[in-house]
Image (cartoon, rainbow, N blue to C red):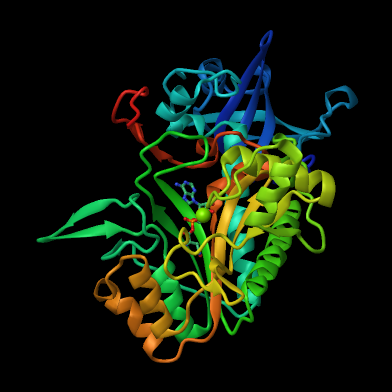
Amino acid sequence: MRTLSVETNNKIGQEVTLKGWVNARRNMGKIVFLDLRDRAGIVQVVGVPAELDEASQEKLKTVRPEWVVEIRGVVNARGAKQQNPEMPTGMVEVLAKELKVLAEAEPLPLDLEDEKIGMDVHLDYLPLTLRADKYRAVFKIQAEIVRGFRDYLNTQGFTEIQAPKIVAAAAEGGADVFEVSYLKNKATLAQSPQFYKQIMVGVFERVFAVGNCFRAEQHATTRHLNEFTGLDLEMGMITDHHDVMDLEMAMMRHILNHLDATVSSELKIWKYARPLLPEKVPFMTLREVQQLIKEKTGVDHISEPDLEPSEEKWLGEYAKTIFNSDFIFVTHYPTSKRPMYTYPDEKNPEFTKSFDLLFRGIEITSGGQRHNDYNALVKSMENKGLNPEDFKFYLEAFKYGMPPEGGFGLGLERLTARLLEIDNVKYATLFPRDLNRIDLQISPPEYKQ
Ligand code: 4AD
Ligand code: MG
């Protein structure tokens, strides 16, 4: 029976069979140390020729990083000097008795633990570079973020839905829509599950979706992807956008606790500092933020419809210093700049009951209350120069009783990047698509439109 690397801790003195990849090989004279990596972790194997049969001795000479091997051996406690308390299996090692090769690997084109591998090389070799400890950690953590999101919402009466990705109309407006040929017609790739999650509020009241979102970004930045993973939710029977914001932060707290409980050793690899998340996350209107920036820095952007990236960064630092929070909500973006489904503030309809959540100085979420009245929604479309006929299907949902509702979309890769303080979102994206790349480069790296 196979033993996983981390299970060796409880099997001192016993014979085990391990299967895994050679993560590293170290020669000490005739003795060979192999770090063996499997799905659960890494364990040190000691290869002493005298302990092995002849065939195994020969194999021990040849195995290199990424070879897949099967090792039968005995678990021993490490000597006091060899112990490594940083490593989950750092108190044991396996003395090999037999070694079989399950798959060979070509010599590696790069050293996986090399800190200086550039972005393009990293991406060109992703099937290999993702195996490095650092990146296995990123995507293990990401998987647990998704699990935490799901688990929390399932306890709060949400139903998970699958929203289509081939759609007829652009939900978020704007120019960043991919067109695709659709049999004899044209269609677009969904920018978000927005319409479908709203329609589903009429069915289930509370829904969420985890799914790919597509944006035809024509520029290269450290925060934009052309395909990202949206963590979306939508909920009915709200009073206003604050209900959605409160739920988001309760969800965030759950995710952070969940990460501490499940991936603490992966977090350690990234020197993770748990984000500051106060009981009540601060919120300010866009105009209040702009006023503040004017007072503190002299920059007057009071008539701008959005914050610049540098202003978001500034606000992130301000929130940390003044409110002891790594998160801050900015509310009340102008009606003219928010999508047509956004609910205007009754007190000042030029601004919306919408919000962005900034985490360590970068937007990770947009959300808000939505129009739930059919006539108001049609009017809002018309005000934006849109033809309600194009949205007939979506509008059906609002004809037959839609409660006051709202929701948000959270970018999984941005959240992961900010949590681990990774400065380019592409390192927190499993297979990033950008201006120049779909897996491999499709145009020269300097291409900018
Ligand atoms: O701000 P966005 O465009 O909002 C929506 O899609 C709305 N439907 C949300 C809602 O429920 N009202 O996208 C939501 C989040 C952003 O805050 C960001 O984290 C992420 O999705 N996002 C991107 N991430 C990487 N690359 C891109 N090009 C992104 N565009 C949005
Ligand atoms: Mg946004």
Which quadrant holds residue 397?
bottom left
The one of 349 and 18 positioned closer to us in this rendering = 349
* Residue at x 42%, y 56% (from the top left corner): 212
The percent coordinates of residue 413 (x first, y second) are 54, 47
* Residue at x 36%, y 78% (from the top left corner): 378
Residue furthest toward the bottom? 400
**Could one spot residue 101 in this view of the protein?**
yes
Count of all numbered marks drawn on residues in the image: 0
Q: Is residue 284 above or below residue 122?
A: below
The percent coordinates of residue 238 (x first, y second) are 61, 81
* Residue at x 82%, y 63% (from the top left corner): 279
The one of 283 and 179 positioned closer to us in this rendering = 283
Left or right: 106 in relation to 356: left
Residue furthest toward the right? 80
Which quadrant holds residue 89?
top right
Quadrant (top left, top right, bottom left, bottom right) of the C terminus: top left
The one of 431 and 248 positioned closer to us in this rendering = 248
* Residue at x 53%, y 34% (from the top left corner): 131
**Could one spot residue 71 in this view of the protein?**
no
The one of 275 and 210 positioned closer to us in this rendering = 275
The percent coordinates of residue 209 (x first, y second) are 48, 67
Left or right: 441 in relation to 320: left
Which quadrant holds residue 163?
bottom left
The percent coordinates of residue 352 (x first, y second) are 55, 67
Residue furthest toward the left? 184
